[in-house]
Image (cartoon, rainbow, N blue to C red):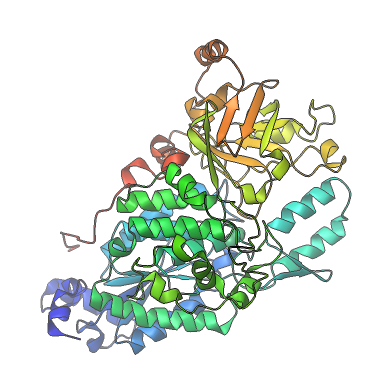
Amino acid sequence: MTERAKGKRRSTGWFSGIDRNTFIHRSWMKNQGHPDHVFDGRPIIGICNTWSELTPCNAHLRDLAEHVKHGVYEAGGFPLEFPVMSLGETQLRPTAMLFRNLASMDVEESIRGNPIDGVVLLVGCDKTTPACVMGAASVDLPTLVVSGGPMLNGKFRGQDIGSGTHVWKFSEEVRCGLMSPEDFRDAEAGMSRSAGHCMTMGTASTMACLVEALGLALPTNAAIPAVDARRRRLAHQAGNRIVAMVEEDLKPSQILTRKAFENAVRAVNAVGGSTNAVIHLLAIAGRVGVEFTLDDWDRLGRDVSCLVDLMPSGRYLMEDFYYAGGLPAVLRELGDLIHRDALTVTGRTLGENIDGAPNDNPEVIRPQDNPVVPDSGIAVLKGNLAPDGAIIKPAAASAALLRHTGRAVVFEDIDDFYARIDDETLDVDASCVLVLKHCGPKGYPGMPEVGNMPLPPKILRQGVTDMVRISDARMSGTAYGTVVLHVAPEAAVGGPLALVRSGDMIALDVPARKISLLVDDEELARRRAAWQPPAPITSRGYVKLYVDHVLQANEGADLDFLKGGSGSAVPRHSH
Ligand code: FES
């Protein structure tokens, strides 16, 4: 390493020199057994770990951190692992999304306030990836993402079952008596049978693809199963590479360009990715100051087909996706739809990274002329019901419902929904449109994944498996159905969704990108005049901060004061 590089190293501001402060910084670190020479100006690499036993998808990340450390040491750096808030999608109430922005603040301040020169983000479960990327982007030190990887394919009674996707399927079957409670219980262990995150193309897998397409992760990071030794090899290589990135001063701001965001949208659509990617990518763009809107999502998705045959849109699972070639093969299949010259953490362009990437199973990763679902990009809908936009994932919807007009059956909030959906006297038929209010960022609060409302049992018994559903909520990336999500403005701030009443007619026209409440303007004005905002949920704590400052879904649901970045400088000492 050059003396010039050593002299400019950020961490030398803590460890270089003979004075009271540098004594304090070095001495206390030495209680862990670190020798003098690790403070000689070599790159200090933070390993930002979202490990937690309460986040089962990330419970193996301590092990993965050791392999990153091997790589860092080998390349002449000094690794220091630190924990940040972990968000477990399956355990955390009321919803992990409520805490994404809080976790991002933890990540941002932990990176900025500590003596590190570069950082590896260890992520996995849905919100851990955007939270860490958002926080790190606001600091802008050299950053590399290592995902924990998906679980092995789920197995039950001789068939592959997918995380989440089969939960929805099995739970509906139990509700209408097609599956026994005993079988339901047995399927649990078969579904989650190894370390790792959901192995469908749910939000975790989508976000892993998204960061790889953005250029923030090494090629193939997205798909290697958590327990495949090649995941550890990749972690080791990430340790090597982050040291070089510090030497090169290669920062997120050089990687997270407009072209990178466009690549990410194409990639998410090509893998049939989760609708949650929309909200997270908008939030990340907000942190780095790249102009990026819902309309960009729609425009960039229009000529992309779903090429990856994975649940919930298709048949296979992440293990199959990795063996077929993973994301590099998909990006290569996308050809001219990808900006090949976008810079990545490898120091090379995305195009250079994917040159020669093989597609070893064209059944799993289809060529563009034989897609799983043609022209299937996530669509942005607008109209008098969603003036600032709503989204739908056509690849997960029923083709016959993409143009549909139906009578609204309205649930004022999630409690109202659960109280009435199983009621045999509910006035509903298969042509109706289920509408759920007060599940947006401020309304729930936290915008939970309840948008894929279970259907009424009496409809299920008719053999109907899909209805049009509309809400200001999100939907699990593992779910499916003709589900309109992220309606903005949300009901809790008086968006038109708040004015819908049972019996109103609603028209959905996905090809025309329209969603319309067929009620005349005078009547809507009368309803608006009578509308009362909901009472505040709480008067204290983080939830109050969140409700007071959260942006709407079409702006990424970040906190308004977190947009942008503050860099890595910390002008004052602690002593
Ligand atoms: Fe963690 Fe699905 S619950 S990734």
Q: Which quadrant contains ligand 1?
A: bottom right
- Which quadrant of the figure has residue 20? bottom left
Residue 325 point in image, percent of width and height:
57, 75
Residue at image point 35% right, 41% down = 560
Residue at image point 35% right, 79% down = 241
Spot the residue most to the front.
369
Q: Is residue 417 left or right of residue 532?
A: right
Residue at image point 60% right, 17% down = 519
- Which quadrant of the figure has residue 94? top right
Q: Is residue 49 left or right of residue 255?
A: right
Residue at image point 30% right, 69% down = 142
Q: In which quadrant of the rendered image does the C terminus lie?
A: bottom left
- Return the residue nearer the eye: 501 or 186: 501
Residue 535 point in image, percent of width and height:
51, 25
Note whether 566 is above or below 317 in the view shown: above
- Return the residue nearer the eye: 356 or 393: 356
Q: In which quadrant of the rendered image does the N terminus lie?
A: bottom left
Note whether 569 is above or below 62 in the view shown: above
Residue 161 point in image, percent of width and height:
74, 65
Note whether 252 is above or below 5 in the view shown: above
Q: Is residue 223 visible?
A: no
Residue 405 point in image, percent of width and height:
69, 29
Q: Is residue 466 left or right of residue 486?
A: right
